[in-house]
Image (tube, helix red, strand yellow):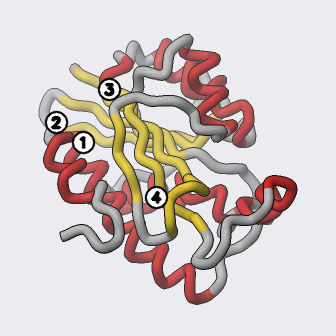
Amino acid sequence: MRTRLIVGLGNPGRQYERTRHNCGFMAVEKLAGLAGAAFRKCRYAAALVAETREGDQRTLFALPQTFMNDSGLALRDMAAFDKVALDDVLVVCDELRIGIGQMRLRLDGSDAGHNGLKSIAAHLGTERYARLRIGIGPLKAMPAADDQRDFVLGAFSAAEMKIIGNVLESACDCCRLWLTGDTARAMTLYNKRKGDE
């Protein structure tokens, strides 16, 4: 049986639930819920995990509980225990450098300064894994470097939450296309920038 692993990045705890940095958690929680899968504590990794099975494919949905900067620990342990190939890993996270309302699916790439992705690359020993970045970029000017931490750990405004609600729906659709192996179609549909036709 083939096992595929979708990991949402975020920080555990009520104080972080609706913050910008927790978009990955939000998307994977929604995706698992739509699939009828409930999260439970993983017994072999520091994560909450949900599972579905369909035919010869098993899908794991994971929310690392290590805090963002150590996300790679849980992913490494799950991938090793469940014998998940790198091609069968998808990481969902926030991205400050992409405008809110947009997202990007890539099959590999750099961490672009994202500490969760940096941890994953360090623990997997490679950057060759798929990632879906959900834009949280501000509607106005990019915050100064010293203010970026406060920005990403801040809560979405009411107006932003309306946008994010729609984006999370699209993120779930994108993840489902990835699961069926239709990555090229997912990229065509969801990697558009504002103003693209």
Label 2 – label 4 distance at C-alpha: 19 Å
Q: Are marks 1 and 2 in contact (CB under 8 Å)?
A: yes
Label 1 – label 4 distance at C-alpha: 14 Å
Give residue 192's position: percent from left, percent from top: 28, 60
Q: Is residue 8 visible?
A: yes
Above or below residue 8? Residue 86 is above
Residue bearing the label numbered 3: 88
Q: Secondary structure at mark 1?
A: helix
Residue bearing the label numbered 1: 178
Give residue 138's position: percent from left, percent from top: 62, 71
Identity of the residue furthest to the bottom in this view: 159
Closest to the observer, 191 or 67: 191
Q: Count of labels shown?
A: 4
Q: What kind of residue is marked 2?
A: Gly
Q: What kind of residue is marked 4?
A: Ala
Q: Earlier in the sequence, mark 2 or mark 3?
A: 3
Q: In the rendering, which numbered label is found on residue 28?
A: none
Residue bearing the label numbered 2: 181
Residue bearing the label numbered 4: 27
Closest to the observer, 57 or 75: 75
